[in-house]
Image (spheres, rainbow, N blue to C red):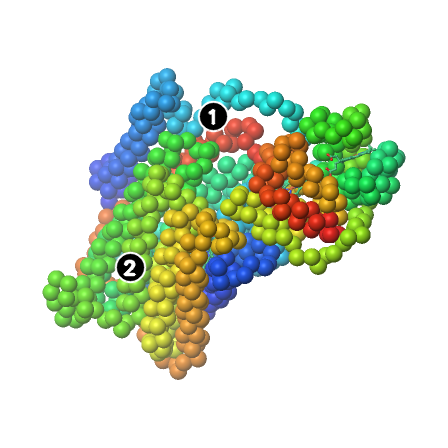
Amino acid sequence: MSEEKLYSLRNPWFSISVGITVAIAVLSAVAGLIWFPLLQPNLKLSGIWDAICSAAGVPGLSTQAGAVPPAFKTSNVVMTPEMLTRQDQVSIGRGATLAQRCAICHGPQGVSDANSPNLAGQYAAVTYKELNDFKTGARVNVVMTPFAANMTDQEMRDVALYYAYLPRVPSSLVNPNLTPPAIVVTGAPMRNIPPCGSCHGEIDVKAGSPWLGGQSAVYIKAQLQAFASGARRNDISEQMRNVARQMTAEEIDQVARYYEAQP
Amino acid sequence: MLINKRLILSHFWLAFIVFGAALVLGAWQMFVRSPLNAWHFNPEFYYRSVTAHGTVMGYVFPTLVAMGFGYAISEAALEQPLIGRRWAWAGLILVAVGSVVAMIPVSLGLASVLYTFYPPMIGNPFYYIGVVLVVVGSWIWVALMSINLAAWKRDNQDKPVPLAMFANVAGSYLWGWTAVGAALELIFQIIPTALGLTATIDAGLARVFFSWTLHAIVYFWLIPTYIAYYVIFPRAIGGRLYSDAMGRIAFILFVVVAMPIGVHHLFADPQVGAGLKFMHSVFTGLVALPTLLTVFTIVASAEIASRLRGGKGVFGWIGALPWKNPIMLATALSFVMLGFGGAGGLINMSYQLDSTIHNTQWVTGHFHLIFGGAIVIMYFAIAYDLWPHLTGRALDSLGMMRAQLWLWFIGMIVTTFPWHYVGILGMPRRMAFYDYANPAISPQAFSVTMSAAGGLILLTSGILFLIVLIRGQFAARGEAGAYRFAIPLHMPVRIPVALNSFGLWLALMIGLTVINYGYPIAQLMVLKGTSVPAVYVGAAR
Ligand code: HEM
Ligand SMILES: [Cu+2]
């Protein structure tokens, strides 16, 4: 056995196995990278090299050109899970001063009695993003927009960290024993609605999803209707519009009352 | 000659204990998402459970079986004590520690990312680190198998390597190389993101790396089963192996063509070009070859055994087979499941047909039938065959063994046939909740209930299996004799170097990997802007 030379073209095991392998690889490459792509007129290939690039998956240059820009402003915030997760005492201090302007509507402790959204204990990244969107015009509200319009990026970060630092205050309607509506726990797969809890907490928290517990039912309902009608469209990749559009009026009522009663 | 019996037995016991636990989770999963369960709990538990079940059944259990069986083969086939005994124990400890490290965050709900990792979802780093430890432990085994073979070859220059060891080493090389894909994904992409060193991850590249592992890992699961077909089955039924060379060729083919085909798991992914998908499909077609060779050779071996026992006629010989023998029964049932599963596999491997069942429950039904059915039933057979030699006590509950194997077969059919069917109806996989009251889903309710019943049958069979093994540990002592493998019809005296060594085949394996994976990987690594923000699961509530 030992005298037989394996790596030699004269050894049929070597020549045949390598030959067959190379032949299959070459034939499948020729068929897959050249022949089949050229058979497809809709690819509009300009030649063999073009066919190879297309079939190998080289990204085309033309993809960007065809995109139609939206007729409205979209959010320019890039949301990451790390955004504004570090506490910063100096920043919080500055935020406390800035927040005095906001207290008439959002409450001195970040909790409002007037159906303006509560901000106390909200994730800093959320507050920052919403302010940014008000400022750029991606989210529009006649009452709120003017307050964000003149804020600098640093000011928005400071207020956001300040409100995140304030403790959440449960509403007077709190009732943690309320059974969650089905849409919160299971979503509605047939309508492509994931469980609210998979982004907004209880199941998982996904970056940029606001904390909803204790928010007034009136506000939640108004926002869901705004998402559904397209009046609010600052949510990145239509995450919320796709959900809200598919919800029934009854479900919107249920979730609004449910979240209002959560701590 | 089995010397390190405790080492081998420890591998098998750990394998079957984790298998039993994961089996309970499997049956529970099937039940909670069936109409039998009034939905009232957090769906996150479902994903926790599927992550644990998949990780144990996919990574830990088969790896331990392959390792334990591999050590047994090395000692019994080469007739030499295992070299590197301490290393082998270290490998086992790494696998055990890795499993625990991985399972703690999973049970706490910090890593419900499923066993395929699913980036950009990112869980607790310890989950991935645990999986890496399991793989590193198994790489020790890979190294030991090749060291033991090399030592034997040095002392037995003119003898052909016994088929059992040849196949075993082939499997270990295949695993060593295919695990590299997932290891690269974990070490260079996922773990840095999980540790917070980077906030974005190239999910497309990660999926390509994972596909590198994902196909050949199924052959790694399968190889102990095929080894049992070739070297246990013919001996156990009192026959001979029809062809030794055919066996070698089958295992060589697995080594060469199992690798360059993983992109068939990415048919629906945009980051790989259509031409490369086609090349992977062509090689995918070729992997049917070793299985066809095996079916032919093993059926021929069965016929030899039957005719030796006086079996007659064109089909009459089938009746004369020793059907009361558990190994006979297991192999036959395994073949039936392999046949059905293989037919399903033909659908998966074709680009067009695959699109109709992609990401549906068809896929889970399919791999449970092949892996949980055809493959695992032979793991049972291997355990039954080895146990008396490892414990020095006879396994005498033959009736119970047969009942257990039948229950596994029936349970698997009852579970997986409806499972395939609901997939065709469009039931998506990896979902915790199905609203069976919805008219579009209600036609699936009956089939899912049937699968849940099948799950209970499987659980019963699993429990029975453990009872047989435990009883075996306490049976009366009895010398089982030397552990031997099947003898071929024609004992090879001289065989071509090609069928007795791995260099050429490993070169082809690596060469084809480079051809079929080189470009997609290089392109995705070079392209800028292909990363997306990580989505951390189990974040602060
Ligand atoms: C009582 C028997 C079993 C039942 C009822 C069962 C059930 C299940 C269920 C319901 C899933 C989740 C499917 C999904 O949601 O997509 C699953 C996943 C899985 N099962 Fe099993 N299983 C059983 C036995 C096994 C066995 C014996 C193996 C292999 C040794 C196995 C391997 C796997 C793997 C690897 C996954 C992960 C799939 C994924 O993440 O999509 N199972 N099983
Ligand atoms: Cu595959």
Relative placement, left or right, of A92 versus B39 is right
Residue, disc 1: A59
Mark 1 element type: loop
Sort mark 2 into few (<14), some (14-19) or many (20+) by Cα contacts within 10 Å: some
Residue at 44%, 80% in the rendered image = B474
B364 displayed left or right of A247:
left
Measure the alpha-carbon separation of dots 1 and 2. Answer: 45 Å
Q: Is residue B306 above or below residue A105?
A: below
Give the residue type at disc 2.
Answer: Val
Q: Position of residue B3 (x, y in %)?
A: 40, 68
Residue at (49%, 65%) from the top-left corner? B24
Question: In terms of depth relative to the viewer, which is nearer, B498 or B96?
Answer: B96
Chain name for mark 2: B
Chain holding disc 1: A
Which residue corresponds to the image point at 80% horizontal and 52% vertical from the top-left? A172
Q: Residue B140 location, x and y as percent?
A: 47, 54
In the rendered structure, find residue B23 and report the number of the disc placed on it: none
Residue that extends furthest to the bottom in the rendered view of this protein: B476
What residue does disc 2 label?
B336
Q: Amino acid at mark 1?
A: Pro
In contact (CB < 8 Å): disc 1 and disc 2: no
